[in-house]
Structure formats: structure tokens, C-alpha cells
Amino acid sequence: EVQLVESGGGVVRPGGSLRLSCVASGFTFDDYGMSWVRQAPGKGLEWVSGINWNGGSTNYADSVKGRFIISRNNAKNSLYLQMNSLRAEDTALYHCVRKVNTIVGGTIDHFDYWGQGTQVTVSS
Amino acid sequence: EIVLTQSPATLSLSPGERATLSCRASQSVSSYLAWYQQKPGQAPRLLIYDASNRATGIPARFSGSGSGTDFTLTISSLEPEDFAVYYCQQRSNWPSFGQGTMLEIK
């Protein structure tokens, strides 16, 4: 059974930092690209960042570029999100998600497994 | 940035009826569109990817169609467990999501 379990969320002051972690199980982690998607309270979904299977390619939403860093450790089946210079608008539930792996096209930016999320609250 | 607009915002139907949900993109996304279902307190679940491919374990009553800028998710005969919020998502550019359609029991 595929499982994605996030941790590391919490309450932080504006300008502060947090590091989110996601531990994956039930599949061969380094066969898949991964991403982070967030959902503000009562709001819709926003893609935050993505990473390919070996960490050699990363991308970011404009809203977090220059402040967040995505990384992974395949030996530990883990995905990370280093969040710096946090703002009130970063307050959200952060989901670790697995990219769909197609036979022909490799991994694509649709997301077939989601963790339950870790809550990040930025408030003074 | 590609903006996805979903309609209607809320759809009220009864079990057994057919549901048709729409998603329009601000520019062509080819067939690179997915649909997700989200129930309260749960993470989203992938239903359809690349416009018309059902994800693993998704019942046949869910189908997707469209290309370019106009897409449709159809639920052929609503079951009680289908009442939820539905999101579309494109991957033509950096991924983005629509604002959601709430499917509620009439």
C-alpha cells in the first residue's frame, strides 16, 4: 500500500523558517517524481514545487521561488521542503504528492497519491 | 500562468442522475488535464489524468473528455459517495488547479 506521511509543520512567525518532511512507503521511491501541493483553509489547491526522480531537476511556483527549496533523499525514501522567509499567505495544509508514472511518457505532473498533509501556520 | 475556470460553482443533483462538470483553460493545455475528487477532511483523489485516462481503481461511471481549452468530467449515474468537491488541474505549464465545483445532494 502506497503511503506518504508528512511532518514538520507548526506555527511560525513571519520571516521564520520550517522544514517539512515526507516519508514514502509501498513503492519504489526513486522511480517517481514528487511534488508539494498546499491548500489554504477553506480554499482550493495550489501546486508549490516539484522534483524529478534523482533531484536533478526542480521547479517552483512563482509565489515561493527564491524562498522554498525542495529536495529528496532516495536512500531514506524521503522528500523535503525547506521553507524560508515565511509569510502569512503561506499558511496552509501542505501535501506531499506522487507524480503519475506513465509507461510511455515517464512521470508527469498529475498526482496519483497524496499524503494527509502537515499544517503550517504563519502568524505573529 | 494558465487559469482554469470551473463551472458551475455548485451543482445540485440526486443519486442516480448524470453529472456534467466543466473546466475551461485560459489557453490551450492540449490533453494535459486531470480531475480530482475531495471529500471533507480528506486529501484529494485522482480520478482522471490526461483528459480521459481513468486512474487506478476509479469506477467506470467516471469519464473525462475534451482537449485544448474545454474539458468535461461526467459521472454517468451518481452514487451517494460521489457528492464532494471536484477540481481540475493542468500540466501544460507549471501545474495549476481550478477553483472547484461542489457537487451536492439535491
Image (cartoon, helix red, strand yellow):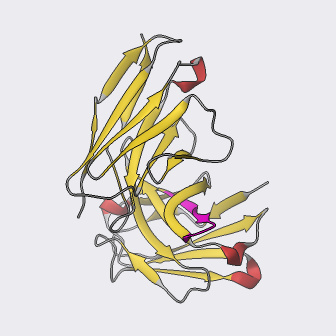
x and y percent of residue A72 in the render? 61, 81
User: Is B66 placed above or below A56 here?
Assistant: above
Left-right relation of A48 to A73: left
**Residue A40 showing in the rendered view:** no
**Which residue is drawn at the image coordinates 61% and 51% (left, top)?**
A116
Residue interval drawn in magenta: A94-106
Is A124 inside the magenta-drawn segment? no
x and y percent of residue A41 in the render? 40, 45
Left-right relation of A86 to B43: left
Considering the whole magenta stretch, tell me its main secondary structure.
strand
x and y percent of residue A17 in the render? 45, 76
**Which residue is drawn at the image coordinates 51% and 45% (left, top)?**
B48
Front in this rendered view, residue A52 or A88: A52
User: Is A52 placed above or below B52 here?
Assistant: below
Is A97 inside the magenta-drawn segment? yes
Q: Quadrant of the C terminus of chain B?
A: top left
**Residue A62 showing in the rendered view:** yes
